[in-house]
Image (spheres, helix red, strand yellow):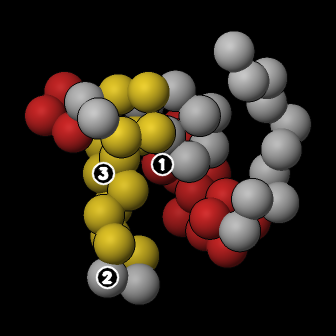
Amino acid sequence: MATDPVCRMTISEEKAVEKTEYKGKTYYFCGKGCKERFEKEPEKYISGENKNWIKG
């Protein structure tokens, strides 16, 4: 399982709609919108700066 770094949704690598590689690591996304947001500001999402989400 992987976590979409933008919306924090848990998704399986096999069923991820989108994926991209950044600094040698593969990131998986629930959709095209999350991937596009990540690609514009990847450091924002991998650094934990984006904390405008709710943990369950």
Asked if the residue at tag 2 contacts the one at tag 3, i.e. Cβ–Cβ closer than 8 Å, the answer is no
Q: CA distance from mark 3 to mark 2?
A: 13 Å
> What is the crowding at mark 1: few (fewer than 14 residues within 10 Å), some, or many (at least 20)?
many
Quadrant in the rendering for residue 12: top left
Along the line of sight, the residue nearer the viewer: 9 or 17: 9
The numbered disc on residue 19 is 3
Q: CA distance from mark 1 to mark 2?
A: 16 Å
Along the line of sight, the residue nearer the viewer: 19 or 3: 3
Instruction: Give the residue number, with chain letter if any, for mark 1.
Output: 35
Query: Residue farthest to the top?
Result: 56
Instruction: Give the residue number, with chain letter if any, for mark 2.
Output: 24
The secondary element bearing badge 2 is classed as loop
Amino acid beneath label 1: Lys
Label 1 vs label 2, nearer the camera: 2
Along the line of sight, the residue nearer the viewer: 10 or 19: 10
Label 3 vs label 2, nearer the camera: 2
The secondary element bearing badge 1 is classed as helix
The residue positioned 54% from the left and 64% from the top of the image is 39
> What is the crowding at mark 3: few (fewer than 14 residues within 10 Å), some, or many (at least 20)?
some
Asked if the residue at tag 3 contacts the one at tag 1, i.e. Cβ–Cβ closer than 8 Å, the answer is yes
